[in-house]
């Protein structure tokens, strides 16, 4: 078997040969320790002074691998240029969690930083013994012990430290940082800009066949019959049928594509979806599986009905959305007759995928290896895990390695989706125009009933565990502003029309859309400027700082909304803002934006976006900025354009025409202010800045037009209907 | 099996294809080992498969191999290496104008065509010219910065 080493230096994709399956539990096939408590599991210093980091956190284009190296390089005093990373290989990397929930830096990076700090202490002690000087007088820099200049490689190179990670090993003082906080360039970018990066879509192994899966016309339709003569003219194709799982494999990829397209099959009629039109009603009236009180402070019900208070209520809706990865999901599987299985995938959770597939297919976990290979951006669990199961099913059937790449209609039609959200919000203002009471009730499609975990095995009749979770959907349903009486109630439905998955900032974007839009509704009802209204309800200095900074950058002029001065010639002009304290515990982010709305055609033009972002300690400011910008643009896309359409049988928005995303000519100018907190732990940045975007946009549109958009997406038709 | 002869990145190539309608994309990727052009949609909607055909921006996923015979194809691999990138790729690297990078080959090839015909475009012209190329990670502003940087270089 061949481990793939994705070098941080970006150019090298090397294959170490000769590793075999088996071995002691807790040891990799290579003899590496996989114990997540051991320093050696996470880092190795070679005889040449090069450092290899091993992590289950994978870099899907977020720059997390670079940030993790910076954190380790800082503690070890070894230059960044000597680092490389092995990511998400179940045979080589310890499992310290999958990739998601913005956990790469705050959990993965912090864990590896502690391993590096433990190693530093050990190296200093070794040097002290050799140099006959107290360790306290020695430091590590440029790969050497100072003073004296002996190399770290000469102390430990090629050998194991054999140490547990010491949670008390002292960390370098932030004031002395020379690597953390610097905008190191990502080493993967040169290969990506010259067509030399090996993506999973480009990956191959000897003897590999190309597979495609033929999906039914109804999500859970049964396969009745297949007419193999319909593809007789296509060379070297085999049809694989396992119950209702239907696939083709061929030596030539184009042959597999044509065969999958042209193969005639009869399917049962299946029409059990509610359809995306009228989904709001389905969500509101669906059977509730679990009701949770998320927040219950004071007595919101009574306070909302108190005499004299000004009361408002509104309903917000967020639709089903797709990860819509630009590169359809892909995987290569090699199921060997001697009982070993290898999967190459860009799954964000290779270790969990192995557990899941091993159990499902009855393969002992130590006989299965899952290896991460860079893929197209996924933003959560897209179709990659499904593609891995598809490839496994086909490889097992034909006894050869098989590569499966989904087609565009597979990706849009069959990736598990970010769920719809329906929120009823009620609020009351006191006589001074402050929030007296607040209530949020949310409805979220749930599972697992009717929600197969992976589509291929489901069709093949292989029993599976629970359906996929959509992630932490209920956070940020309460306002971050002072209010005595607050209640947040979450109702998770027993069922979901479409399979669920975590899609970037699960639930938080929709919840903050409702909470921060409604905050503006209250401010407008009180006749108070939106910034002023927020500041009056805040006491946290970090919250106040980001709001003031975003407002200052956009040139915020204090006045109540809506804007009384319209821009000329049929365009309305407005500005809006929104704030989030992510998960009520993490990043502070404020976003402000300027929009123009064309009253003739309903088109929203976002002109400028400003963002102030505080995620504690900043590891790589350029990587962070790239993530913040991406959060803003992707969420503008989700807010302006995106809604999964489906009929009674299947998803019908299966290409970029049916499921449009943001384009170049809609890209606004973006200014990001990063607030660095050297004394605080680093938080993740893959999600938080996405949370306030939709609300800031809705608030700007209200300021421009006086019309409140409470339903996403803000398409031209939707805007025209409202104004 | 029918053979098709054309030039790729300045080199004469001859490829076999059992189907004259096979899109150029698969011939490049599987026949010639040039993986820079990506499969994104197969519908000409996203631009991930963009190459230059006789210097013109072309969606290789929609271009039958028979129509390429005797013509000149330029792929991202023809625009420099990681060690010696072309000026446009170099500007993308300096601006870190990529996240996952799956769209990047198509972006750079399309930007190259723009800058060849219009060496000093306005930002609006660049937006217009690249509008058929989609990015899902949200790097449009960085890509525009890179194109404008390359135009200045």
Image (cartoon, grey):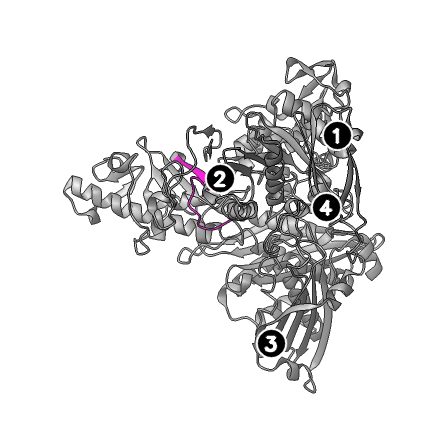
Q: Are marks 2 and 4 on the same chain?
A: yes
Query: Is disc 1 placed on a helix, strand or loop?
Result: helix
Q: Position of residue A602 (x, y in %)?
A: 81, 54
Label 4 crowd (10 A; few <14 / some 14-19 / many >=20):
many
Classify residue A28 by image quadrant: top left
Residue carrying label 3: A486
* Residue drawn where x is 74% and y is 21% of the image: B65
CA gap, disc 2 to disc 4? 29 Å
To which chain does the residue with label 4 belong?
A
State the residue position of label 2.
Answer: A369
- Label 3: few (<14), some or many (≥20) within 10 Å? many
Give the vertical position of B97 relative to B63 (above or below): below
Q: Chain of mark 2?
A: A
For the residues beneath circles 4 and 1, the answer to whether they share a chain is yes
Quarter holding the C terminus of chain A is bottom right
User: Is A184 contained in the magenta span?
Assistant: no
- Circle 4 is placed at which residue position? A413
Q: Looking at the picture, do discs 1 and 2 lie on one chain? A: yes
Q: Chain of mark 3?
A: A
The image position of residue B48, as x and y in percent, is 67, 33
């Amino acid at each position: 078997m061949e481990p793939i080493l994705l070098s941080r230096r970006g150019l090298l994709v090397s294959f170490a040969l000769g590793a075999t399956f088996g071995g002691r539990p807790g040891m990799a096939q290579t003899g590496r320790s996989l114990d997540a408590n051991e320093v050696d599991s996470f880092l190795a210093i070679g005889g040449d002074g090069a450092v290899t980091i091993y992590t289950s956190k994978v870099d899907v284009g977020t720059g997390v691998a670079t940030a993790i190296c910076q954190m380790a390089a800082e503690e070890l005093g070894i230059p960044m240029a000597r680092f490389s990373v092995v990511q998400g290989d179940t045979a080589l990397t310890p499992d310290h969690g999958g990739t998601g929930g913005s956990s790469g830096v705050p959990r993965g990076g912090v864990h590896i930083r502690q391993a590096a700090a433990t190693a530093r202490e050990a190296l200093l002690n070794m040097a002290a013994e050799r140099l006959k000087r107290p360790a306290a007088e020695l430091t590590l820099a440029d790969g050497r012990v100072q003073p004296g200049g002996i190399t770290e490689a000469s102390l430990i190179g090629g050998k194991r430290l054999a140490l547990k990670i010491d949670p008390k090993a002292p960390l370098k003082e932030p004031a002395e940082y020379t690597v953390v906080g610097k905008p190191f360039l990502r080493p993967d970018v040169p290969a990506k800009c010259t067509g030399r990066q090996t993506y999973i879509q480009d990956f191959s192994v000897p003897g590999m066949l190309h597979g495609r899966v033929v999906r039914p016309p109804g999500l859970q339709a049964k396969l009745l019959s297949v007419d193999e003569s319909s593809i007789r003219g296509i060379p070297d194709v085999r049809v694989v049928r396992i119950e209702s799982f239907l696939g083709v494999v061929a030596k030539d990829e184009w042959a597999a594509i044509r065969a999958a397209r042209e193969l005639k099959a009869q399917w049962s009629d299946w029409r059990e979806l509610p359809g995306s039109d009228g989904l709001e009603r389905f969500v509101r009236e669906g059977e509730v599986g679990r009701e949770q009180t998320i927040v219950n402070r004071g007595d919101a019900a009574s306070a909302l009905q108190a005499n004299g208070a000004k009361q408002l209520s509104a309903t917000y809706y967020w639709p089903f959305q797709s990860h819509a990865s630009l590169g359809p999901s892909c995987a290569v599987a090699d199921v060997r007759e001697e009982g070993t299985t290898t999967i190459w995938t860009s799954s964000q959770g290779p270790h969990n995928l192995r557990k899941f597939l091993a159990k499902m297919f009855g393969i002992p976990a130590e006989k299965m290896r899952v290896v991460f290979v860079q893929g197209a951006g996924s933003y959560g669990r897209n179709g990659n895990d499904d593609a891995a199961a598809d490839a496994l099913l086909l490889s097992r059937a034909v006894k050869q390695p098989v590569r499966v790449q989904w087609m565009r209609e597979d990706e849009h039609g069959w990736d598990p989706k970010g769920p719809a959200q329906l929120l009823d919000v009620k609020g009351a203002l006191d006589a001074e125009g402050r929030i007296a009471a607040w209530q949020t009730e949310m409805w979220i499609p749930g599972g697992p009933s009717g929600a197969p975990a992976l589509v291929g095995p489901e069709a093949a009749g292989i029993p599976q565990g629970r359906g996929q979770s959509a992630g932490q959907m209920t956070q940020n349903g309460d306002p971050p502003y002072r209010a005595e009486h607050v209640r947040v109630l979450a109702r998770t439905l027993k069922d979901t029309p479409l399979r669920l998955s975590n899609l970037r900032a699960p639930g938080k974007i929709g919840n903050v859309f409702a909470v921060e839009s409604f905050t503006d509704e209250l401010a407008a009802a009180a006749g108070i400027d939106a910034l002023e209204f927020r500041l009056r309800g805040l006491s946290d200095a970090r919250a106040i700082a980001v709001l003031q900074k975003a407002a200052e950058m956009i040139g915020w002029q204090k006045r109540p909304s809506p804007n009384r001065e319209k821009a000329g010639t049929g365009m309305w002009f407005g500005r809006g803002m929104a704030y989030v304290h992510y998960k009520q515990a993490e990043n502070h982010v404020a976003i402000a934006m300027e929009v123009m709305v064309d009253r003739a055609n309903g088109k929203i033009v976002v002109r400028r976006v400003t963002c102030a972002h505080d995620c504690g300690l900043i590891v790589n400011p350029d990587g962070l900025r790239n993530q913040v910008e991406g959060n803003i643009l992707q969420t503008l896309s989700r807010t302006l354009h995106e809604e999964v359409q489906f009929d009674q049988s299947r998803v019908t928005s299966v290409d970029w025409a049916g499921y449009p995303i943001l384009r170049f000519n809609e890209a606004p100018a973006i200014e990001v202010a990063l607030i660095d907190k050297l004394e605080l732990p680093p938080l993740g940045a893959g999600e938080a800045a996405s949370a306030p975007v939709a609300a800031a946009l809705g608030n700007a549109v209200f300021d421009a037009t006086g019309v409140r958009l409470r339903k996403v997406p803000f398409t031209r038709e939707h805007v025209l209907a409202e104004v | 099996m029918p053979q098709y002869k054309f030039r790729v990145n300045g080199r004469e190539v001859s490829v076999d294809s059992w189907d004259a309608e096979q899109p150029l994309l698969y011939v490049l990727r599987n026949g010639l080992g040039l993986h820079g052009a990506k499969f994104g949609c197969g519908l000409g909607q996203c631009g991930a498969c963009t190459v230059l055909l006789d210097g013109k921006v072309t969606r290789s996923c929609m271009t039958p191999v028979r129509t390429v015979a005797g013509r000149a194809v330029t792929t991202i691999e023809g625009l420099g290496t990681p060690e010696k990138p072309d000026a446009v790729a170099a500007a993308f690297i300096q601006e870190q104008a990529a996240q996952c990078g799956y769209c990047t080959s198509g972006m750079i090839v399309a930007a190259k065509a723009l800058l060849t015909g219009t060496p000093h475009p306005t930002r609006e012209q660049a937006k217009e010219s690249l509008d058929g190329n989609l990015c899902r990670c949200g790097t449009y502003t960085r890509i525009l910065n890179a194109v404008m940087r390359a135009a200045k270089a």
